[in-house]
Structure formats: C-alpha cells, structure tokens
C-alpha cells in the first residue's frame, strides 16, 4: 500500500505540473501521514539528508563553474579547439566534440555545458550552412558529457549515496568520457565529408601555441581536481573549494574578465543551481527512506534476481530500466531513488560499485537526450529552433554511439576497473 501511495502520489503531482522535487516531497509527506509518523520527522529527514560534508562539494563546484563561465573560459577553449582542428573538414563540429569534453572537466553539469556550447556554436554552424538538426544534436550530445567527465555532479551524488570512492569514480569516468568525445568527432568527420562542410583553415604553429597558453589555465583545472583527489592532497569537497578559489583568481587576475560588479550575479547563479539540486536531494532522500522502511528495494531486488541470475541478462535488465527512467527523470532524482534499489542487485551479480556508478550515469546521460523529458534535447531545440521531431531523427547516430559505450562499460569491467583503488 505504501508503494502505491508514494509512486501514485508522485505521478499525480507530476501530471499536475509540480516540479519534480516538490512532487517527491509531497508524496513523501503522504507516506509519513500513512505510517502515522510525527510530522516533525518530515523536516528532520529533509535537513539531515543534506547535512553532509561530501555534499558540500556540489555548491563549491557550482561556484567554480559559474566563475569559469563568466571568466572567458568557454571562448578560450573554443579558440584553442579551432586552432587544433581548423584544417579538418567539418572543423566546427570537431570543435564542439572536443570542447564538450574539456568543458565537462570544468563545470560538472551537462545542461550548463549544452547552454554554453549551444549559444556560441549553433549560430556559427548555421552561418556555415551546417544542417541545423545535426548541429543541435551534436551540441546536446557533446555538452551532456559534463554529466560523465569529472567533476560530474551526478557522480558526486552517486558516490555519496553508495559511500563509494569519488576519486575512483572520477578517474574511472575519464576513459568513457574521452571515448565518447572521440567517437562523436569521428562521426562528425564522416558526416562533414558526406555533406561537404568547410575547412576553417590552418592556423600557424605560433598562433596555436598562443591559444594553448591562453587556454592552459582552463586545461589545468581537471588536472588539479583529479590529481589532488587521487593523490590524497584533498578530499572531493576540499577540491571544490580549491578549484573555486583557483577559478576566481584566474578569472580576476589572469583573464581579468571577472569584476566586483559580476560577483553577486555569479554567486546568485551558483546559489540557485545548488538550491535546485539540494531540494531534489532532500526530497528524494526522504522518499528513499520511506521505500527502504517498506523494504521495497529488497522486494524489487528479489524480483529481478527471480527472473534471472545470469549476469549478462541481469545487466541488460538494469540498463533497460535505467534508460526508461532516464526518459522521465533527471539524473539527480533518478540516482537517489534507484541506487538503493539497483546497487544491491548489481553487487549480487559481482558488479563493482564504481563500474555500476558509471553504468547509471551513462544511462541517465542518454536520458538527457531523449523525449519526453530530455532536458538537454529541449534546450538544444530551443537554441537552434529545430522542432523536437526533426531533432529526434538527428539524434539517432549519437544514441547509437552512447549505447555502444554503455555496453562496453557494462560488459568489460577492465575498461573502468583499472581506476579502482586496491
């Protein structure tokens, strides 16, 4: 009965148009009333779910991303990519693919990267007669890599939920992130040759070096994060603080594009983004606690294991479930709701928590690009003006690439297992 109240209430509130976090919170409140728990428990559980030192990494990385965005980083990364790929057919498409990977190592947010890349690159690609559907699908797919490439906010949420090593998760995510960027670039080259897209022109070695020097401050950011965490110099939370200070110093004193007048706006952007995520975390943690109290995760795990104990089929079932959920829920709520249910099932099949975390994140990244609630897809459609139906067709090759990498992560543990600490 409690499951019907929780999920039925959640679906009802979504149909009524409430934001996901409020729908989950109100459904949880109905569950508390059903159990007869004191109302004070509702506020207490909401507070304790976000009263976590590791979760402090999220506002710090959000602040770092906002500082880097306003500090001219996006433009310098794109300029460097143009210098490197200007002599290849379809240069702008390669700029998008490579910039998506680099920017993912800065912001930690796929949607933020889609907005940043799209606002700059889609108009430029239109001027050079690139197909609008291809341009929008490429920008959305490459930008969404911010959900995979460290310091991914989704990975931090998963790591906190499962008590897994965030350093291991970050390191293991590098290979799938780079592979996806490379495959997007290869497809872009094929598409550009097929349609005769232009070469932007060669850039001299001196100019390349100059652009590299300008972008080097941005390129150091992922190295600082991964190297510091893996080297034991700081925790992920402390790493967020280090990178935020680094971003402020670079944007203010090196690039000189962050002024005192911009700081309130930057802080407000970071605060709003953090508040959205924190509200979702608080609500879904309450929801998950009620589900656990009802022993629903154990019931679902038993049901899935009852269907098959074959690891290959089990992972296939889990992937299908995550793909379907990703079509309707953003990564944060989906991770917090499903991790308690699916992580024990994956563990019973011998899947390492780090490997399973990447399986979850890649599935939910694909969800950003699929209707009916694909945030990155709708954002790209809005920026480009391409209708969703036409854009859906343009996404087919990118979905195929991402599903291929997902299968690689799912069925070849060594692809991510090398990063796991002993």
Image: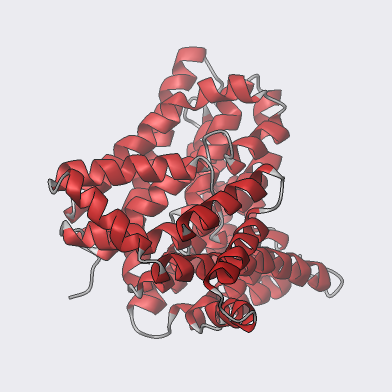
Asked if residue 37 is positioned above or below residue 197 in the image, the reply reads below
Q: Quadrant of residue 317?
A: top left
Residue 347 visible in image = yes
Question: Residue pushed farthest left?
Answer: 310
Q: Quadrant of residue 263?
A: bottom right
In the drawing, does residue 88 fall left or right of residue 418?
right
In the drawing, does residue 348 fall left or right of residue 9?
left
- Determine the residue positioned at 57% across, 71% down: 32
| Position of residue 56 measured from the top left corner of the image (x, y, whole percent) | 56, 79
Question: Residue pushed farthest top?
Answer: 195
- Determine the residue positioned at 13% across, 49% down: 309
Question: Residue pushed farthest right?
Answer: 261
**Quarter of the picture holding the C terminus:** bottom left
| Position of residue 85 measured from the top left corner of the image (x, y, whole percent) | 49, 37
Seen from the viewer's position, the closer of residues 285 and 262 is 285
Seen from the viewer's position, the closer of residues 141 and 196 is 141
Q: Quadrant of residue 248?
A: bottom right
Tally of numbered tags: 0
| Position of residue 121 measured from the top left corner of the image (x, y, whole percent) | 65, 37
Asked if residue 344 is positioned above or below residue 36 in the image, the reply reads above
């Amino acid at each position: 009965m409690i499951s019907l109240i929780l999920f039925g209430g959640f679906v009802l509130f979504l149909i009524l148009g409430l934001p996901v976090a409020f729908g989950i919170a109100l459904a949880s409140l109905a569950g508390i009333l059903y159990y007869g728990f004191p109302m004070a428990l509702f506020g207490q559980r909401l507070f304790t779910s976000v009263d976590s030192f590791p979760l402090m990494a999220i506002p710090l990385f959000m602040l770092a991303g906002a500082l880097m965005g306003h500090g001219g980083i996006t433009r310098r990364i794109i300029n460097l990519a143009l210098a490197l790929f200007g002599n290849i057919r379809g240069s702008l498409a390669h700029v998008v693919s490579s910039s998506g990977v680099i920017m993912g190592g800065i912001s930690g947010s796929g949607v933020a990267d889609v907005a940043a890349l799209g606002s700059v690159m889609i108009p430029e690609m239109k001027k050079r007669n690139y197909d609008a559907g291809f341009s929008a699908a490429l920008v959305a797919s490459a930008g969404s890599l911010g959900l995979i490439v460290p310091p991914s906010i989704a990975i931090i949420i998963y790591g906190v939920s499962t008590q897994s090593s965030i350093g291991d998760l970050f390191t293991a995510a590098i290979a799938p992130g780079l592979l996806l960027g490379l495959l997007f670039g290869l497809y872009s080259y094929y598409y550009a040759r097929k349609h005769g897209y232009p070469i932007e022109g060669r850039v001299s070695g001196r100019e390349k070096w100059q652009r590299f020097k300008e972008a080097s401050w941005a390129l150091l950011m992922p190295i600082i994060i991964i190297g510091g965490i893996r080297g034991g110099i700081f925790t992920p939370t402390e790493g967020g603080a280090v990178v935020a200070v680094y971003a402020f110093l670079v944007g203010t004193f090196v690039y000189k594009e962050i002024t005192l007048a911009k700081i309130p706006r930057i802080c407000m952007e970071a605060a709003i983004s953090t508040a959205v995520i924190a509200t979702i975390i608080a609500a879904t943690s309450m929801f998950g606690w009620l589900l656990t109290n009802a022993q629903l995760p154990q019931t679902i795990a038993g049901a899935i294991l009852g269907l098959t104990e074959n690891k290959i089929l089990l992972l296939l079932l889990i992937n299908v479930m995550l793909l379907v959920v990703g079509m309707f829920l953003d990564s944060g709520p989906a991770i917090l709701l499903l991790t308690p249910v699916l992580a024990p099932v994956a563990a019973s099949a011998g899947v390492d928590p780090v490997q399973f975390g990447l399986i979850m994140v890649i599935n939910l990244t694909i969800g950003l690009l699929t209707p009916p609630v694909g945030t990155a897809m709708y954002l790209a459609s809005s920026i480009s003006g391409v209708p969703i139906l036409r854009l859906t067709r343009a996404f087919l090759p990118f979905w195929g690439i991402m599903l291929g990498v997902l299968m690689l992560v799912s069925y070849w543990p060594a692809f991510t297992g090398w990063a796991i600490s002993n």
